[in-house]
Structures are given as structure tokens and as C-alpha cells.
Amino acid sequence: MAPNDAAIDADSRGFGPGMGPVSPDRGIALVDLLMATAITATLAVLVVPLTESAVMTHEARSAASYLAAGLRETRLAAVTSGRAAALVFDETADGSWTIRRCRDGNGNGVRRAELTGGPDSCLDPQRIDWLFGGVTVGLDPATPGLDEPPGQSAGVRFGTSRMSSCSPAGHCSPGTLYIRSAAGQFAVRIAGISGRTRVFRFDPGQRQWVSL
């Protein structure tokens, strides 16, 4: 047999010139790798939106818990200091909201008219959307409020003063805050006489508010 014929015969039996046998498992392994890559890419496409939704829900819930804690601390400050204290909400020019922790300076309670230049005093304001990314103060108009049907969007429900003021006796201005993100709607409510603060989450599946 000529040398070239031997090389051709070797190739036809699955051998290369000067090589050992080529295993058919190599082709199977390549197919498995391609399938695994395709499955991983598909899962990544599905998981990323779910992760983003979970993060946005967590941010909104954290904001609601933070504001609830602020209301409780305001009441405690009034009781322990013997002077009225308030959590004050201000809307900025761009539609965002800030909170200020304020206290009475002359014994007549915390008043808006006395916050600028005294005698009442406040700590520096904090922007809620800077503390919690993607979170806004407001109610989705398609979502019913705790006490009203859909159609309302105002997030701060403390009357025209837009503050929750607590007296040394522990009584507070009653009201509700609505906090939302792209993935979740929450509410914070404080009772007037008892000063009890509660956090709620809106369940879109059941179309009702759930106490947390």
C-alpha cells in the first residue's frame, strides 16, 4: 500500500495522521456545553427582572419602616423631653419630599409659622428619594387607599400642616403616609390618641391592604 493510501485509510477509520483515535464524546461534550450556555442565558434574562423587582420592593418597604420609626421617635422625644415634637414633611420644587425632625421652642406646640427663624427648631431636612433609591411619596391612582377608593394620589395625609406633631402626653396628629416604588405600595399610619404607628403593604393579587 502506498504511503498516501495508508494515511487516507487511517483517516477513514477515525485516525488522523500521526494521531490517536478521535473520541465521539468530544462532539457530545460540545453539544452539552452549548445547551448549558443557552439555558444559563435564558435564566439570566428571567432572573434579572425578578431581582430588580425584589430590590424595588425592599427599598419601598425600608422607606416605610424608616418613616414609621421616625414617627415613633418623634412621639418618644415629646414624652421624654416634656416639649412637643413633630415630623415635618415638605415638598420640593421637583416634586420630591423631605422630612425634618422639629421641636417646640416656646411651649405652644410645633407650628409652621415658627419653624423659620424660630422659636421652634429643626434638624436638617432629609430627602426620601435620596435615602431610598427609586422610592417616592405618593399613592398609585389605580390603588385604593386605606379608607378611600382608587383615584387619589397624595402621599402625605396630615391636613394642611403636613406634619405629625406629638404632645408631651403622647398624643399625635393622626394621619397617613403613602410610599411607593415601581414594584410596591406601602402605607404608614399613626393614630391620634394612642400614637400607635402601623405599616401596611398593598397586596395587588388580593386587592387589599395587609398589616405588617
Image (tube, grey):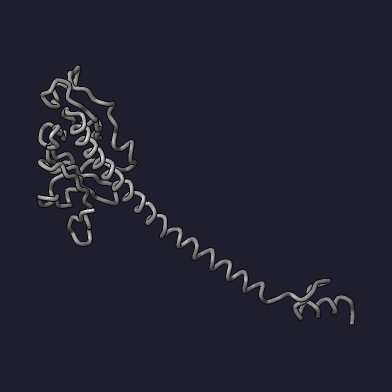
Residue 13: give x, y in percent of width and height.
76, 81
The residue positioned farthest toward the top in the image shown:
117
Residue 89 visible in the shown view: no
Residue occupying the point 16% across, 29% down: 84
The residue shown at (34%, 53%) is 53
Residue found at the very far bottom of the displayed protein = 1
Vertical arrangement, residue 75 with respect to residue 146, above or below? above
Position of residue 77 measured from the top left corner of the image (x, y, whole percent): 22, 32
Q: Position of residue 116 (x, y in %)?
A: 19, 20
Quadrant of the drawing holding the N terminus: bottom right
User: In terms of depth relative to the viewer, which is nearer, 53 or 31?
Assistant: 53
Identify whether 191 is placed above or below 205.
above
Between 78 and 10, which is closer to the camera in this rendering? 78
Above-or-below relation of 202 to 194:
below
Q: From what the image shows, is residue 204 above or below residue 191?
A: below
Taking the view exactly as shown, the residue that stands out farthest to the right is 2
Q: Is residue 33 left or right of residue 43?
A: right
Q: Is residue 171 visible?
A: yes
On the image, the x and y values in percent for residue 21 come to 76, 76
Front position in the image: 3 or 122? 122
Q: Total of numbered circles in the picture?
A: 0
Q: Residue shown at 24%/30% (left/top)?
A: 100
Q: Residue at x 17, y 25 (%)?
A: 104
